[in-house]
Image: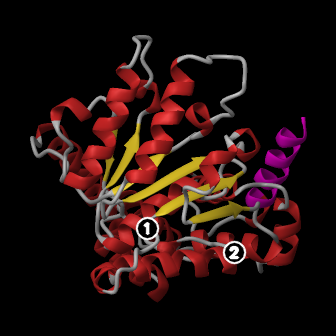
C-alpha cells in the first residue's frame, strides 16, 4: 500500500488546494501499486484520477465566479489579480532575508497597535537580485501570510504614448491602495525606475518616475508596496530612501540547494541513496526557479514512465544540462 509519507503529502496538498501536486502524488501512488503487482487497484485508481481531472476542468470552464477582491473596472487593464496559496514557510531563503520578512509580517499583523503609538509598520519593500531568486514569490508569500490579495501591476498597461495618461493611471493605482488593502507588486521595476538622467525615453518615463516618487512618499495606506528588479544599479538613487527595506536576493548556496531539492521531492522516494552534497555542487550557479523546475521534471519522468521511485541519474543529468546551457 501507499507509503505513510505519500498519504500525508496527499492530504496536505488537498488542504493547501494544490491541485497539480495532489494529482501528481495520486499518480505516483498508482504507479507504486502497479509495480507491487496490485494492477487492478492501480488501474481503478488511475481511472478515478482521470475522471476527477476531467470534472475539475469542466467546472473551471463553466464556473462564472470571479476572483476575490477584483479591482475597479478602470484598473483591470492595469492590475493582474493573484490569490496566493503559499506562505514564507514554503520558501527556501537566506536566514537574514527570512528574519527581515518575518519582522515585516509581524508589524503588519499588529499595525493597529503600532499606529496607536504613532508608529508606522514597514510596508514598502524593494527586492533586488538575479532572475528566479524568489522576489515575485516573496510578494505572494507575504500576501499568503496576511490573508490578502496580490495585485501585480502591469507596467505595459501603465505606460501610454499620450502626455500625462501614464501619470493618471499611476494615480489610480495609488488610490486603490487606500481603497483596498493588498500587496501591490511592481515587477521589473527598472522599466519605470531608471535614472532620470538617462537619454532614452526622457519624456513620459521621466514623468512617471517623478510621479511614483511623489505618490510613494505621500502614500499613507495600509497596503504593502513591493518593487522588484534584476537591475538595481539602473534605478534612480532617489528611489532607495522611499523604501522601508531594501532586500538583496542571492543565488542559493549549497545548503539552500539541498533544502530546495529535499522540499520539492519529499513526497517521493529515490531509487538509490541520495548524496545531497553532490547534487548541490552540480546545481551551484542555478537559481531557485531552475532547481524547482528540474525537480518537477524528474517527478514527471517517474510518473510518465510508470516508475515507483525517482531516478537519481535523471536529476543529476538535468542539473548538469541546465548548468551547461547557462554557461553558453
| Magenta segment boundaries in residue numbering | 314-328
Asked if residue 245 shows in the view, the reply is: yes
Is residue 217 positioned above or below 324 on the image? below
Seen from the viewer's position, the closer of residues 322 and 154 is: 154
At 27% from the left and 81% from the top, the residue drawn is 112
At 69% from the left and 46% from the top, the residue drawn is 237
**Badge 2: residue crowd in 10 Å (few <14, some 14–19, many ≥20):** some
Most common secondary structure along the magenta stretch: helix
Q: Which residue is mark 2?
A: 94
The quadrant holding residue 18 is: bottom left
Q: Secondary structure at mark 2?
A: loop
Q: Position of residue 135 (x, y in %)?
A: 58, 56
The quadrant holding residue 214 is: top left
Q: Position of residue 295 (x, y in %)?
A: 64, 60
Seen from the viewer's position, the closer of residues 46 and 204 is: 204
Asked if residue 1 shows in the view, the reply is: no
Quarter of the C terminus within the rendering: top right
Q: Secondary structure at mark 1?
A: helix
Q: Which residue is mark 1?
A: 142
* Residue 249 on the magenta span: no
At 42% from the left and 73% from the top, the residue drawn is 38
Is residue 197 positioned above or below 288 on the image? above
Is residue 265 positioned above or below 305 on the image? below
Amino acid at each position: 500500500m501507499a507509503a505513510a509519507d505519500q498519504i500525508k503529502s496527499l492530504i496536505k496538498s488537498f488542504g493547501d488546494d494544490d491541485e497539480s501536486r495532489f494529482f501528481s502524488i495520486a499518480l505516483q501512488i498508482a504507479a507504486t501499486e502497479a509495480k507491487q503487482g496490485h494492477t487492478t487497484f492501480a488501474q481503478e485508481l488511475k481511472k478515478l484520477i482521470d475522471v476527477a481531472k476531467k470534472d475539475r476542468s469542466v467546472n473551471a470552464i463553466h464556473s462564472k465566479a470571479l476572483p476575490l477582491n477584483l479591482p475597479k473596472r478602470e484598473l483591470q487593464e492595469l492590475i493582474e489579480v493573484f490569490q496566493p496559496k503559499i506562505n514564507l514557510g514554503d520558501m527556501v531563503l537566506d536566514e537574514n532575508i527570512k528574519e527581515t520578512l518575518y519582522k515585516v509580517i509581524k508589524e503588519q499583523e499588529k499595525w493597529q497597535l503600532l499606529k496607536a503609538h504613532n508608529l508606522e509598520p514597514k510596508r514598502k519593500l524593494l527586492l533586488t537580485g538575479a532572475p528566479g531568486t524568489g522576489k515575485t514569490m516573496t510578494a505572494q508569500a507575504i500576501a499568503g501570510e496576511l490573508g490578502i490579495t496580490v495585485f501585480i501591476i502591469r507596467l505595459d498597461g501603465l505606460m501610454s504614448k499620450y502626455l500625462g495618461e501614464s501619470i493618471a493611471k499611476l494615480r489610480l493605482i495609488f488610490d486603490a491602495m487606500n481603497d483596498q488593502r493588498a500587496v501591490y507588486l511592481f515587477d521589473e521595476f527598472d522599466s519605470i525606475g531608471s535614472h532620470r538622467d538617462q537619454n532614452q525615453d526622457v519624456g513620459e518615463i521621466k514623468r512617471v518616475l517623478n510621479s511614483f516618487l511623489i505618490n510613494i512618499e505621500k502614500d499613507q495606506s495600509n497596503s504593502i508596496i513591493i518593487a522588484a528588479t534584476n537591475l538595481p544599479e539602473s534605478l534612480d538613487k532617489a528611489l532607495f530612501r522611499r523604501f522601508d527595506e531594501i532586500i538583496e536576493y542571492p543565488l542559493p548556496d549549497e545548503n539552500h540547494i539541498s533544502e530546495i531539492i529535499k522540499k520539492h521531492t519529499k513526497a517521493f522516494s529515490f531509487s538509490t541513496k541520495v548524496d545531497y552534497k553532490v547534487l548541490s555542487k552540480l546545481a551551484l550557479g542555478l537559481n531557485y526557479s531552475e532547481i524547482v523546475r528540474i525537480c518537477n521534471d524528474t517527478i514527471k519522468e517517474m510518473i510518465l514512465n510508470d516508475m515507483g521511485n525517482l531516478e537519481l541519474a535523471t536529476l543529476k543529468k538535468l542539473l548538469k544540462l541546465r548548468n551547461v546551457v547557462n554557461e553558453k
